[in-house]
Amino acid sequence: MSQQPVLIKVGGSLQADAVAALVQAIRAAHAAGRTAVVVHGGGPRITAALKAAGLDLPFVSGRRVTTDEAMPIVERALAEVGAELAASLAAGGVRVRQMSGAAGWLRAQPLPGMARTADIAAVDAGPLGAALSAGEVPVVAPIACDEAGVTYNVNADVAAGAVARAVAADRAVFLTDVDGILRGWPEGERIAEADEVTLRTWLVDGTLSAGMIPKVEAALAATAGGVTAYLVNGRDAAAVTWAVTSEQADAPRFGTRIPAKLQGQAVPAASPEGEVAAP
């Protein structure tokens, strides 16, 4: 059985609906000898909190522009979502550890013109490894900080791709509110399996619209690090469990699978105490 972790990313609009499916999938992963790391979003909660504060921030290519004024609101909303998700998983019998990259182990790469919105420059896998070694499932909020300790908002899909690579995950499973990668958003043809070249072409030619772009970019970040990515509907318990536990040689039954990029050289990965730069 594989001892590599499974990375599971839970979309911000899915927490309430996906908990039962997530608990079932994590239990199935544990039964198969796999540990799990969960990265969560918080989009709807953040949007509601910003609206209550009178802030309406634009999105660029699926990422929210986060101002200095908005950042504390974003952090509070994500902390609330993380606490609720961790409590729900614990109620389902899953041992969890709520975590945030604001502690310093997610290093931010600020995006030009996006204020306090960033990509991930590097991941220190040590805190994640400590939680996994203790038999706990890390529940991670996508906040990063720079060398000066300034915090940044990171798209949760992007954070998940970077974390998956850093922990040398067996696979990265992105739970969404749609049935996989769609050629046309929010409705369109589901793509059962796609390779890197095809997806990068679609990113450039407009085949994939804004809501799908961060998901595909994050999946490609994971596959570039040697991690196979799955995008499935988080409300479908059978789909989630299949994505978490299936053999990678199996034909895709649900969602979209993106095979890991195979290279002639070793894929860099962080040790439990090490740090790895994000692709």
Image (cartoon, grey):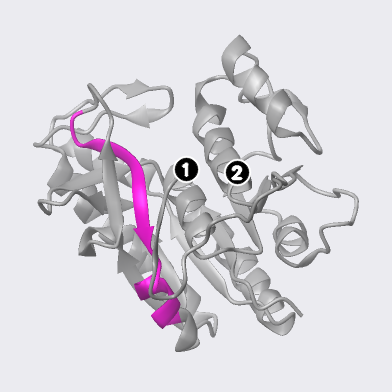
Q: Residue at x 74, y 45 (%)?
A: 259
**What is the number of the mark on residue 247?**
none
**What is the number of the mark on residue 279?**
1
Q: CA distance from mark 2 to mark 1?
A: 7 Å
Which residue ends up furthest to the front in the rendered image?
Answer: 265
- The kind of residue on which mark 2 rests is Ala
Q: State yes or no: residue 56 in magenta.
A: no
- Against 260, is 193 above or below? above
Q: Which residues are magenta?
A: 115-131
Q: Residue at x 68, y 75 (%)?
A: 29
What is the tally of numbered marks visible in this picture?
Answer: 2
Q: Earlier in the sequence, mark 2 or mark 1?
A: 2
Q: Position of residue 182 (x, y in %)?
A: 69, 28
Viewer-closest of 278 and 156: 278
Viewer-closest of 272 and 239: 272
Q: Position of residue 119 (x, y in %)?
A: 35, 39
- Against 69, is 233 above or below? below
- The kind of residue on which mark 1 rests is Pro
The residue carrying mark 2 is 224
Quarter-wise, where is residue 193 in the image? top right
Q: Residue at x 29, y 22 (%)?
A: 58
- Using the rendered image of the protein, determine whether residue 141 is visible from the camera's viewpoint: no
Q: State yes or no: residue 124 in magenta.
A: yes
